[in-house]
């Protein structure tokens, strides 16, 4: 049958392998290389979610007293028990996360702006300006931190904005010193001299060459500084210089009824203290992991692994 036509079946097209998104690959690699940093990132995300959706997560309002529920121990109805006037501790801890996140991120943002302006300008201009600015920074850092904050809050009065302003001004001095060192190291690179030789202006050199190369340092300082700011806010609230009642603050919850009824209802002090510890631990571990990943000196192999 020479004239017969034979049908040839084409092979079925092979299915392309499922590609995992790059973002998911980076997250999985981060979790494998930095397990403690991944735990810290989960705690940070959980804290932010609690702060943003506090109205939906908390079953009660932060100042709502449940009738007949005074100093109840933790149970299925009240996960963290109740305080001395019948308020749900879980709801108050959730609303307290909003205070910590607001103070932490706002303070770190202002601190980063102030420190970047001081550090980069001091490193770039140099000369007499650098000497004067650094001597002012030395004098500012020589004063006890608690004395400065208490003095500023005593003059400005308690409140959220005053607390953020006092903490940001205090933290800008030490942060600017680190940013200045990173900017000085960046300015020694040949591309900065090449930009000057090509006639680039001061603004172009700062924003296109200096700032992009100190961004990693700024991110690391900001992430690690969040835990320090949250701890400082809790300490000031414990001393009575933080957020005034009735709005809940973790430090204020420890100082008020938590300290007075610690022996009769230990959960009133235990859960706010645990919230402070977990928040500070999460930001510190996450910031430490980012330092190992973003710092080129540590990324090359000299950095110590976390976990």
Image (tube, rainbow, N blue to C red):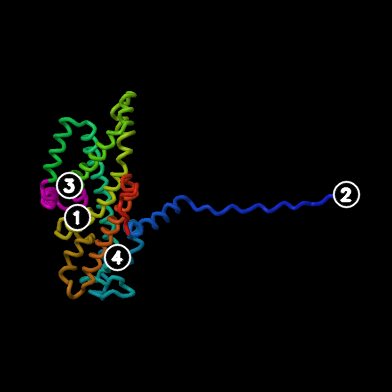
Q: Earlier in the sequence, mark 2 or mark 1?
A: 2
Residue 170, labelled with which disc?
3
Q: Earlier in the sequence, mark 4 or mark 1?
A: 4
Residue 2, labelled with which disc?
2
Of badges 2 and 3, the one in the foreground is 2
Q: Which residue is mark 1?
A: 232
* x and y percentages locating residue 235 in the rendered image: 17, 58
Query: Between residues 144 and 81, which one lies in front from this camera angle?
Result: 144
Residue 91, labelled with which disc?
4
Question: Does any portion of residue 53 appear in the rendered image?
Answer: no
Residue 130 image-quadrant placement: top left
* x and y percentages locating residue 199 in the rendered image: 32, 23
Query: Between residues 78 and 64, which one lies in front from this camera angle?
Result: 78
Q: Earlier in the sequence, mark 4 or mark 3?
A: 4
Of badges 2 and 1, the one in the foreground is 2
Residue at mark 4 to residue at mark 3: CA–CA distance: 32 Å
Q: Is 97 on the left-hand or right-hand side of 237?
A: right
Residue at mark 1 to residue at mark 3: CA–CA distance: 11 Å
The residue drawn where x is 31% and y is 71% is: 79
């Amino acid at each position: 049958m020479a004239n017969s036509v034979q049908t040839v079946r084409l092979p079925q097209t092979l299915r392309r392998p499922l590609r995992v998104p790059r973002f998911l690959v980076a997250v999985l690699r981060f979790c494998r290389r930095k397990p403690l940093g991944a735990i810290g990132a989960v705690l940070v995300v959980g804290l932010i979610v609690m702060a943003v959706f506090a109205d939906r997560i908390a079953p009660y309002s932060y100042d709502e007293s449940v009738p007949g529920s005074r100093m109840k121990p933790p149970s299925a109805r009240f996960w963290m028990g109740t305080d001395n006037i019948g308020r749900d501790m879980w709801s108050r801890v959730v609303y307290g996360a909003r205070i910590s996140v607001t103070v932490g991120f706002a303070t770190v943002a202002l601190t980063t702006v102030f420190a970047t302006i001081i550090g980069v300008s001091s490193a770039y201009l140099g000369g007499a300006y650098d000497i004067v600015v650094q001597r002012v920074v030395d004098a500012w850092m020589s004063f006890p931190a608690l004395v400065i904050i208490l003095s500023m809050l005593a003059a400005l009065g308690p409140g959220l904005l005053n607390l953020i302003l006092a903490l940001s001004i205090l933290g800008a001095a030490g942060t600017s010193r680190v940013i200045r060192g990173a900017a000085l190291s960046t300015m020694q690179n040949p591309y900065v001299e090449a930009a000057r030789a090509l006639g680039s202006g001061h603004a172009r050199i700062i924003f296109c060459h200096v700032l992009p190369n100190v961004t990693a340092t700024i991110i690391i300082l900001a992430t690690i500084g969040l835990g320090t700011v949250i701890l400082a806010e809790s300490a000031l609230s414990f001393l009575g210089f933080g957020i005034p009642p009735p709005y809940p603050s973790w430090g204020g919850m420890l100082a008020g009824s938590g300290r007075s009824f610690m022996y009769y209802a230990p959960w009133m002090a235990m859960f706010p203290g645990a919230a402070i510890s977990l928040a500070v631990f999460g930001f510190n571990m996450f910031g430490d992991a980012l330092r190992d990943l973003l710092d080129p000196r540590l990324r090359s192999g000299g950095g110590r692994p976390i976990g």
